[in-house]
Amino acid sequence: MEISEVLNVKSIVVGLKATSKEDVIKQMTEVLSQNGDVSDQIQFFDAVMEREVHATTGVGNGIAIPHGRCSAVKKASIVYAKLAQDIDWESLDEKPVQLVIMLAVPETQGDVHLKILSELAMKLMDEELVDQLKKETDPNEIIGLLSREEDEE
């Protein structure tokens, strides 16, 4: 499964106003619910927050990749948010987060979960790509940047 299959324009929020990690996750969960990707916002929110308790999803370089697998997820989906202000995420590099890419996966699709996380991690090691994502505000361009290497394969 490719990133372009689970990310669409309706799932991109530029200028998300939040004051905490929990607030960001709550608002991104609302986007999933509005898009019909989750049947129970609270259940999915709880799954993501439970994951955060075990280890931070702030991967460094201003990026967090919170994720959850639960039965409330109808189909694998990504919500992408560029934050209006940096948020402390207890990141590995101890720096605040500007970009959040949240992954929602049905409980029964663990392999999809790991494949998308791996693909995101590989892409986000590219400093040039991360710099472009931090500057970009057009949802179609953001999808293009995250799908770029898929088109070249």
Image: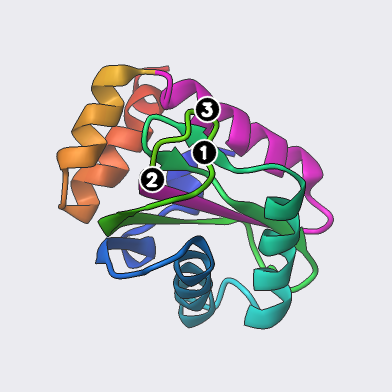
Disc 1 target residue: 91
Magenta segment includes 17: no
Is residue 68 at least partly visible in the picture? Answer: yes
Mark identifier at residue 97: 2
Magenta segment includes 121: yes
Disc 3 target residue: 121
Q: Secondary structure at mark 1?
A: loop
Front: mark 1 or 3 = 1
First in sequence: mark 1 vs mark 2? 1
Mark identifier at residue 74: none
**What kind of residue is marked 2?**
Val
Q: Secondary structure at mark 2?
A: strand
Cα–Cα gap, marks 2 and 3: 15 Å
Q: Which residues are magenta?
A: 98-125
Scheme of image coloration: rainbow
Residue found 55% across the figure and 31% down from its top: 92
Residue found 43% across the figure and 19% down from its top: 125
Front residue of this view, candidates 36 and 136: 136
Percent of width and height locating residue 128 = 24, 20
**What kind of residue is marked 1?**
Ser
First in sequence: mark 1 vs mark 3? 1
Q: Quadrant of the C terminus?
A: top left
Percent of width and height locating residue 143 = 31, 45
Percent of width and height locating residue 8 = 37, 57
